[in-house]
């Protein structure tokens, strides 16, 4: 009995030390994440506009957004298009490169580092500005195409192509999911491929029957990550469009529209409602992804 | 332990909810900086408190002020030099300068004021007068003027009134009194043998010049930039028609006005007088130094007339300047605008800040720097002095100064105060860019773009 008490006390002391170490993180999360989230929820039901003279307006902001604000729907359309093309594009590209890099080639570390580099700097202001130059009317892309007799307008200045250039920018940042895929591929036992090879399975069959099923948890993880990042995309659209969401609102991303409402039009309560709608959208698609992928994701531990 | 953490989280949540829901409580009851901001705003809006303003009397007490403004590196360096000069004269002052960009500064001031940490003095534009006053971000400078702490010596009424809204002096004009001018590539027009625009020209003259120039230009160069989305040009055009972009409560023009304006620029695009939509949109958001005209791809654009000296220094061609074209049969009126300095509503050193601001307004070196940079300064007393010095040969004239003075003198009888810019007007200005782009890219007809503009604007102003 005494031994058990001592054991419990030791366990509690150990746990207490753990909690003590966690306090800074918990405080940070509370102050910088949880409280702002709660405050923004409250503000979404007010007409807060950077003054303390604000009022409770109930669901007015949400109703106005959904029933009257054309820019809101345009921003949803642009963002959905972006997510629809950028997320699968990034995942496919990252997976293909990870599979190639997993072939045991020489200098793997160097390749990995080089391919990862765009992910480190990809979402930055500098790269977005560089993108303006690359895809501009006289940018590198058009100069190259002109050598083959193809003359294109400005990719970022034409609403038919501007979103496409931002999607390319997202896909270009395939480094982070690639590294995760690479780690997942390393965990697939080599003997499975050997056995499949002996049984006469070709490379393509091995990829679809072994690689993809065993990599499915990693794919799901990367998919959710990319999905959330896709909905949150802001910097490239802001820089490339000069903060306007143009040309012709083709780059009016959801977050850019939110930012403009909050900081250009000073409608902070309205923008908070917009932020919560985004939260609901992202939450819905994340849950949907989990629900839909339940049947396709293979966890080795559940075998 | 789990229970404890759950209780802690719940308590914090309740506390934060309670804190948010407490806006009805008097601001003075809280000691947080966020609560001090509205309290200060009340002070700013209250005439009684403001009327009791006591000017700063120089003494040895140490004072630290924070001062922020936007602009090019040259302008930041200039301000730092003035601060150094001021601190030499008043060694008890320490002035910390914070260099900013225009866009980021407006956001920062909003947030810093809420946090009670805004700089004592900050730059602002006429576009944000109403916004800044409504949100209690600055104090009324009227009582400071009345008390003599802020001297109006050398300042024209029109310029001072332009920095006020509804009788409240929100900011004090700095830098340069400026109106819009049309900049043109004089070298190219001369080379093409096209008549140069002159002060007093009309829209018909404008069209004749660009129509004469366009066929002679090489591919990839246009007679004028597409200014259909340029708020400044649209505003000038509206004012000459007896209207303006905004009234104190919203828009101050009709759908027919906008339709006429957008159609005019659509016609120019179709005629090839201005660049196609994709070329123009690539330059949206860029500074005037990087505009199509300045990089040699167009021959004309609109900008404040005070940047000619800088334009001449930067361009590899001769830059000409002329007043905007008049609308035939319209009202000859041109709005005067100037950036200004506000005193923060959360400043704890308002008298000291006013003292420094007044020093800036009345110091010859400060005004001379403005004159050298813009060809004109805000203090007319010094404008007259510098002009006289130039005429007598005591002072060297900057390249472009003569043209600026010519435009200034020509437009002086037609100057009017800048029209109001209610909260949301800057967003409405951006809607004009979108409307012009929608038409230019054939995404909407002119009628659809106009309807869309008015619908979006009603939402902006309703906020």
Image (cartoon, rainbow, N blue to C red):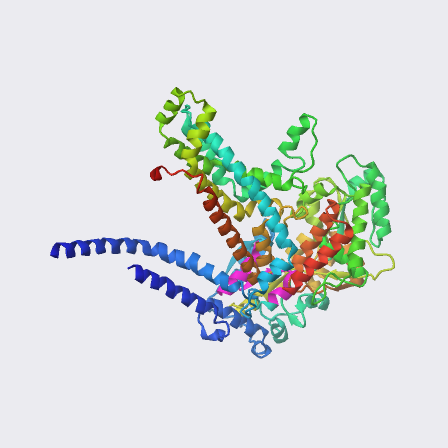
Spot occupied by residue B151 in the image (x, y as percentages of width and height): 64, 70
Work out whether A93 lies above or below B421. above
Q: Is residue B348 visible?
A: no
Instruction: Return the residue nearer the eye: B278 or B196.
Output: B278
Left or right position of B148 against A25: right
Q: Out of A134 and A196, give the one closest to the viewer.
A: A196
Drawn side of residue B135 relative to residue B92, left or right = right
- Verify whether residue B118 appears in magenta: yes
Q: Is residue B355 magenta?
A: no
Total count of labels: 0
Vertical relation: A235 (above or below) A98 = below
Among the 4 quarters of the image, the one containing residue A56: bottom right
Q: In which quarter of the view is residue B331 placed?
A: bottom right
Percent position of residue B315, x then y: 70, 42
In the rendered image, the quadrant that contains the C terminus of chain B is bottom right
Relative to residue A148, is residue B406 depicted above or below? below
- Does the rendering let one see residue A71? yes
What residue is at 55 percent from the left and 74 percent from the top? B43
Between A253 and B57, the residue placed more toward the observer is A253
Q: Which residues are magenta?
A: B104-133
Q: Main secondary structure of the magenta part?
A: helix
Picture quarter containing residue B318?
top right
Residue A53 is left or right of residue B162, and the answer is: left
Which quadrant of the rendered structure holds the N terminus of chain B? bottom left
| Residue at the outermost left position | A2
The residue nearer to you, when weighing B10 against B356, is B10
Residue A95 position in % (x across, y down): 47, 33
Q: Position of residue B334 (x, y in %)?
A: 77, 60
């Amino acid at each position: 009995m005494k031994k058990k008490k001592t054991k419990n006390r030791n366990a509690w002391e150990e746990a207490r030390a753990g909690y003590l170490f966690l306090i800074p993180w918990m405080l940070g999360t509370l102050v910088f994440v949880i409280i702002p989230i709660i405050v923004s929820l409250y503000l979404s039901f007010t007409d807060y506009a950077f003054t303390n003279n604000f009022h409770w307006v109930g669901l007015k902001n949400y109703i106005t957004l959904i029933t009257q604000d054309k820019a809101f729907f345009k921003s949803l359309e642009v963002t959905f298009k972006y997510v629809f093309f950028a997320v699968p594009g990034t995942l496919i590209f990252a997976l293909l490169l990870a599979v190639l890099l997993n072939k045991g080639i020489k200098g793997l570390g160097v390749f990995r580092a080089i391919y990862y580099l765009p992910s480190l700097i990809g979402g930055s202001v500098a790269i977005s500005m560089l993108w303006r130059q690359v895809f501009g009317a006289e940018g590198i892309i058009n100069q190259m195409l002109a050598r083959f007799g193809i003359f294109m307008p400005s990719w970022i200045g034409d609403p038919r192509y501007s979103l496409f250039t931002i999607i390319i920018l997202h896909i270009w940042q395939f480094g982070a999911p690639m590294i995760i895929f690479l780690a997942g591929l390393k965990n697939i036992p080599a003997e499975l491929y050997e056995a499949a090879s002996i049984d006469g399975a070709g490379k393509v069959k091995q990829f679809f029957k072994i690689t993809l099923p065993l990599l499915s948890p990693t794919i799901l993880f990367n998919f959710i990550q990319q999905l959330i990042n896709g909905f949150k995309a802001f910097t490239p659209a802001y820089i490339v469009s000069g903060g306007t969401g143009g040309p012709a609102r083709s780059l009016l991303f959801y977050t850019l529209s939110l930012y403009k409402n909050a900081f250009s039009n000073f409608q902070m309560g309205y923008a908070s409602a917009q932020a919560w709608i985004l939260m609901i959208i992202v939450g819905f698609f994340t849950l949907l992804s989990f629900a839909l992928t339940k049947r396709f994701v293979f966890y080795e531990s559940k075998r | 332990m789990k229970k404890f953490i759950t209780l802690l989280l719940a308590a914090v949540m309740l506390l934060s909810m309670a804190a948010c829901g407490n806006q009805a409580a008097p601001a003075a009851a809280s000691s947080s900086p966020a609560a001090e901001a509205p309290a200060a705003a009340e002070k700013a809006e209250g005439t009684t408190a403001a009327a009791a303003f006591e000017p700063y009397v120089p003494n040895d007490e140490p004072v630290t002020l924070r001062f922020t403004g936007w602009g090019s590196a040259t302008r930041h360096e200039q301000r730092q030099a003035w601060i150094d000069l001021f601190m030499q004269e008043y060694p008890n002052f320490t002035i910390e300068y914070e260099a900013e960009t225009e866009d980021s500064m407006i956001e920062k001031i909003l947030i810093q004021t809420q946090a009670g940490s805004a700089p004592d003095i900050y730059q602002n534009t006429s576009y944000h007068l109403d916004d800044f006053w409504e949100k209690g971000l600055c104090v009324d400078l009227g009582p400071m003027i009345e008390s003599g702490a802020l001297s109006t010596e050398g300042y024209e009424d029109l310029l001072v009134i332009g920095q006020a809204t509804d009788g409240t002096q929100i900011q004090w004009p700095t830098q340069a009194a400026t109106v819009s001018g049309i900049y043109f590539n004089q070298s190219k027009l001369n080379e093409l043998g096209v008549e140069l625009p002159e002060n007093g020209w009309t829209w018909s003259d404008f069209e004749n010049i660009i129509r004469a120039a366009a066929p002679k230009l090489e591919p990839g160069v246009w007679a004028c930039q597409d200014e259909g989305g340029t708020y400044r040009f649209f505003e000038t055009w509206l004012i000459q028609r007896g209207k303006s972009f905004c009234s104190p409560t919203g828009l101050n023009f009709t759908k027919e006005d906008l339709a006429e304006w957008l159609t005019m620029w659509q016609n120019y695009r179709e005629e090839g007088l201005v660049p196609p939509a994709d070329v123009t949109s690539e330059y949206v958001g860029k500074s005037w130094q990087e505009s199509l005209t300045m990089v040699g791809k167009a021959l004309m654009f609109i900008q404040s007339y005070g940047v000619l000296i800088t334009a001449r220094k930067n361009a590899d061609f001769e830059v000409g300047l002329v007043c905007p074209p008049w609308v035939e049969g319209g009202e000859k009126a041109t709005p005067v605008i100037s950036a200004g300095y506000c005193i923060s509503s959360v400043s704890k050193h308002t008298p000291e800040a006013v003292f420094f601001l007044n020093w800036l307004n009345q110091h010859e070196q400060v005004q001379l720097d403005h004159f050298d940079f813009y060809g004109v300064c805000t203090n007319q007393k010094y404008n007259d002095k510098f002009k006289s010095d130039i005429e007598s040969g005591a002072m060297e004239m900057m390249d472009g100064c003569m043209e600026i003075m010519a435009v200034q003198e020509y437009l002086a009888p037609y100057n009017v105060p800048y029209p109001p810019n209610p909260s949301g007007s800057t967003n409405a200005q951006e809607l004009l860019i979108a409307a012009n782009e929608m038409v230019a890219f054939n995404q909407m007809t002119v009628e659809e773009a106009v309807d869309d503009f008015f619908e979006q604007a009603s939402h902006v102003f309703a906020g």
